[in-house]
Image (cartoon, rainbow, N blue to C red):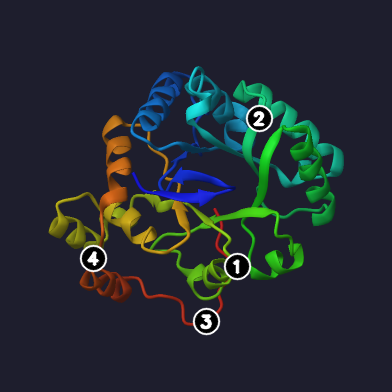
C-alpha cells in the first residue's frame, strides 16, 4: 500500500469514502463490514461528513472503527451553515458522539457558506487546542478561495476529480502542488455508470487485466500529492480499490485518455457534486 503525508501523518493514497452510507438501515451491516475490510487491507483513511445521511454515515463509521480507532486516520466535515464560531464547535461535538471517538484527525469545512473564513478558522483552532481535532482543512475551494484563506495551517483541499472532471488540472492542482497542499479527490470514479463504461477506459482496463474503476483510480493517482477516496460496499470492490495503489498506467494509456477526456485549456468553474 502506497502512502502520502496528510496532516503530518502517513495515510494510504486510496482511502475510503462514505457518501450515501447511513441512509438505508438495512445496508448498515454491509457498510460497516466494507469499512472494516478496507482497514484490514491497509486503507487507513476514512472520510465522512455530518451531511452524509444527516449523521448516519458517521454512525456507520463509528461502529466500523470500534476497537480499531488507532488504525484509522479519521476525516469528517462540517456543514457551511454550522461554520460559525460556536456552530463549528457544537457540530464537532455531535460528530464526535456519532463517531464514538474523542478525536477527529482532520476536520474540514465542506464548502464555503455565509460565515467569514477567519471565524471558521478561529473555531477550528479552538477545537485543535482542545484536542478535539488534529488538523483542519477545506473542501470545494478554488484558487481564489485558498488565496483568500491564506493560512499555512490548512492541511488539505478536498475536491471533485476524475477523468470527466479535470478542471482542477488547469490551475488548482499546480497551485496546491507548488505550496505542498495535498489534494483529496472525491468521486474519483465519478459515480460509476457512464464513466466506467467509457470505451477508452475499458480498453486500458482490458490491456492491464484490471477493472475500469481500477484504471480510473490509477489515472487519478498519477498526479503527485493526490489522495483518492472512493466509496465501496461490495467486498470485491473494496479489494479492487486497495489493489489499485499498485497499478501504473503508461504514457500510451494517458495519451489515450487525454484524447477521450481532454485536459482543460482554460480556467473552468470548480465542479462540485
Secondary structure state at the residue bearing disc 1: loop
Q: Which mark is residue 103?
A: 2
Name the residue at 46% across, 57% down. Answer: 226
Q: Nearer the viewer, mark 2 or mark 4?
A: 2
Q: Nearer the viewer, residue 17 or 251?
A: 251
Q: Is residue 223 left or right of residue 268?
A: left
Disc 2, disc 3: CB below 8 Å?
A: no
Secondary structure state at the residue bearing disc 4: helix
Q: Earlier in the sequence, mark 2 or mark 4?
A: 2
Say which residue label 4 marks.
Answer: 200
Q: Nearer the viewer, mark 2 or mark 3?
A: 2
Q: Nearer the viewer, residue 194 or 202?
A: 202
Q: Earlier in the sequence, mark 4 or mark 1?
A: 1
Name the residue at 37% across, 32% down. Answer: 38
Q: Earlier in the sequence, mark 3 or mark 4?
A: 4
Q: Does the image show residue 44?
A: yes
Measured as percent of width and height from the top left, residue 75 is found at: 58, 39
Q: Nearer the viewer, residue 9 or 94?
A: 9
Q: Earlier in the sequence, mark 2 or mark 3?
A: 2
Name the residue at 67% across, 29% down. Answer: 95
Q: Is residue 180 above or below residue 16?
A: below
Q: Residues within 10 Å of mark 1 (few under 14, many from 20)?
A: few
Amino acid at each position: 500500500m502506497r502512502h502520502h503525508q496528510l496532516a503530518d501523518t502517513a495515510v494510504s493514497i486510496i482511502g475510503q469514502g462514505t457518501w450515501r452510507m447511513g441512509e438505508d438501515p438495512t445496508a448498515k451491516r454491509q457498510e460497516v463490514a466494507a469499512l472494516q475490510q478496507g482497514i484490514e487491507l491497509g486503507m487507513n483513511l476514512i472520510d465522512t461528513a455530518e451531511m452524509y445521511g444527516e449523521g448516519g454515515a458517521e454512525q456507520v463509521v463509528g461502529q466500523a472503527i470500534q476497537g480499531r480507532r488507532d488504525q484509522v486516520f479519521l476525516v469528517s466535515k462540517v456543514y457551511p451553515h454550522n461554520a460559525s464560531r460556536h456552530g463549528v464547535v457544537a457540530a464537532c461535538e455531535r460528530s464526535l458522539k456519532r463517531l464514538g471517538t474523542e478525536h477527529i484527525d482532520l476536520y474540514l469545512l465542506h464548502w464555503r457558506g455565509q460565515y467569514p473564513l477567519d471565524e471558521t478558522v478561529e473555531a477550528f483552532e479552538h477545537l485543535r487546542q482542545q484536542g478535539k481535532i488534529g488538523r483542519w482543512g477545506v473542501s470545494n475551494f478554488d484558487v481564489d478561495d485558498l488565496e483568500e484563506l491564506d493560512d499555512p495551517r490548512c492541511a488539505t483541499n478536498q475536491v471533485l476529480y476524475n477523468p470527466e472532471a479535470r478542471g482542477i488540472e488547469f490551475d488548482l492542482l499546480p497551485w496546491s502542488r507548488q505550496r505542498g497542499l495535498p489534494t483529496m479527490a472525491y468521486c474519483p470514479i465519478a459515480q460509476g455508470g457512464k464513466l466506467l463504461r467509457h470505451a477508452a477506459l475499458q480498453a486500458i482496463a482490458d490491456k492491464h487485466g484490471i477493472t475500469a474503476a481500477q484504471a480510473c483510480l490509477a489515472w487519478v493517482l498519477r498526479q503527485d500529492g493526490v489522495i483518492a477516496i472512493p466509496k465501496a460496499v461490495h467486498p470485491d470492490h473494496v479489494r479492487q480499490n486497495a489493489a489499485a495503489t499498485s497499478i501504473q498506467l503508461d504514457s500510451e494509456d494517458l495519451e489515450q485518455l487525454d484524447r477521450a477526456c481532454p485536459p482543460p485549456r482554460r480556467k473552468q468553474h470548480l465542479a462540485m457534486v
